[in-house]
Structure formats: C-alpha cells, structure tokens
Amino acid sequence: MQTLVLALAWFLVLNLGAGMWRVLRGPTAADRMLAAQLFGTTAVAILLLLAEATGSAALRDVALVFALLAAVTAVAFVRRAWPNPGGGNDAG
Amino acid sequence: MTPGDYLSAALLIIGGLFFLAGTFGLLRFPDVFTRLHALTKADNVGLGLTVAGLAVQAESWAVAGKLLLIWLLVLLAGASVSNLIAQEALRRGIRPWKR
C-alpha cells in the first residue's frame, strides 16, 4: 500500500513537470496562472499522499496552507498582477 | 490486503488518472476557457478521489474530516477562481475558441 501511495506521489510530480510546458509557452498570462493553479492542487494531493506514506500528520497542515495560498494567489493575480495588454493606464 | 485497501487503491489510482487528464487538457486545449474546464476536473474530481482513497485508510475520524475539509476548501477556491479568471479574460477581450 505504501509503495502504491509513493508511486502515485511520483506520478503526480511527473505531471507537474509536464505542466511546466504550459507555464513556459503561455501564450497569455492567464494560461500561466492556470498552470500554477493546477500545480497548487497537485501539490496538495502530493502532500496528502506523503502524509499517508510517511505517517507525519504535519504534512496535512502544509497541504491546507497550500490550498489557501493557491486561492489567494489567483485572486491577487486577477485583481492586481494581470499585465495590461495595452501597456497604458488601467482604465477598467 | 484487506477489502478497504483495494477500495482505497482503486480510488487513488482513478484520482491520479484525473490529474493526468487535467494536465493533458492544460497542455492540449486551445484557449483559456477550455483550459479552465480541464483544470477544474483535476481540482474537483482528481483531488476528491485522492482524498476519498486516503480517508478510507485514515486512522481516525478527525483525520478523515480534515481531509474532507481540505477538499472542500480547494472546491470553493477553485470555483471562485475559475469564475474570476474567466470573467476577467472576457472583459479583456480574449475571444472564446471557435472551430
């Protein structure tokens, strides 16, 4: 059982590696942000799997923090950090 | 392995497949809106099945409840974030993909 859980954690890490392609390519900033969101969720899953495999309950708290941070990051991106295509003042 | 182990293993593996599908969708789909669709499958179903598989194995009800809470938080965050990004993308004139 532990072998399966660890193998799945590795599988999810490989998924993260594949997702890096979208971060590098874009084309828009939103696409990169979506990849980062997927990374956040995958990281939560990896941490939960590791908490089960290694028996350290603290990793579940880390997963909880990751879930919170992913949400805050995305809201900050939409409201503040999304680059303006025109480059001028943000009139909207 | 006990029956609970088999159930847990099946849930975990199916959850992993949903994560794979989400990553594939993110890489292959043509625009922001379709990629949002792929992303939310991994968020909701992939993590949900992973959490379910781990909750079957959990040593106490408190741990299972915590796993469930983490999943609910990701669900809420994912729903509101998808809505925000899609709205803002539309407002900025990113056209939804048409064949």
Image (cartoon, coloured by chain):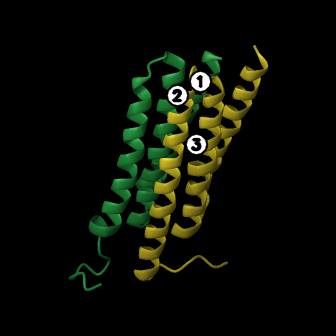
Is label 1 in a helix, a strand or a loop?
Answer: loop
Q: Which residue is mark 2?
A: B63
Mark 1, Cα crowd under 10 Å, few <14 / some 14-19 / many 20+, is some
Q: Which chain is green?
A: A
Which numbered dot is residue A46?
A: none
Specify the farthest residue to the left: A89
First in sequence, mark 2 or 3: give its number.
3
Is label 2 in a helix, a strand or a loop?
Answer: helix
Q: Above or below — where is B25 with respect to B8?
A: below
Residue sitting nearer the eye, B50 or A61: A61
Identify the residue shown where x is 50% and y is 24%. A50
User: Distance between the Cα atoms at labels 1 and 2?
Assistant: 6 Å
Taking the image as drawn, is residue B31 in sight?
no
For disc 2, the chain is B
Specify the farthest residue to the top: B1
Residue sitting nearer the eye, A83 or A46: A46
Q: Which residue is mark 1?
A: B58
Foreground: disc 3 or disc 1? 1
Q: Which three-letter amino acid code belongs to the residue tagged 1?
A: Ala
Mark 2, Cα crowd under 10 Å, few <14 / some 14-19 / many 20+, is some
Quarter of the image where one finds residue A59: top left
Q: Which residue is mark 3?
A: B47
Marks 3 & 1, CB-CB < 8 Å contact: no
Q: Is B41 positioned to the left or the right of B88 in the image?
A: right
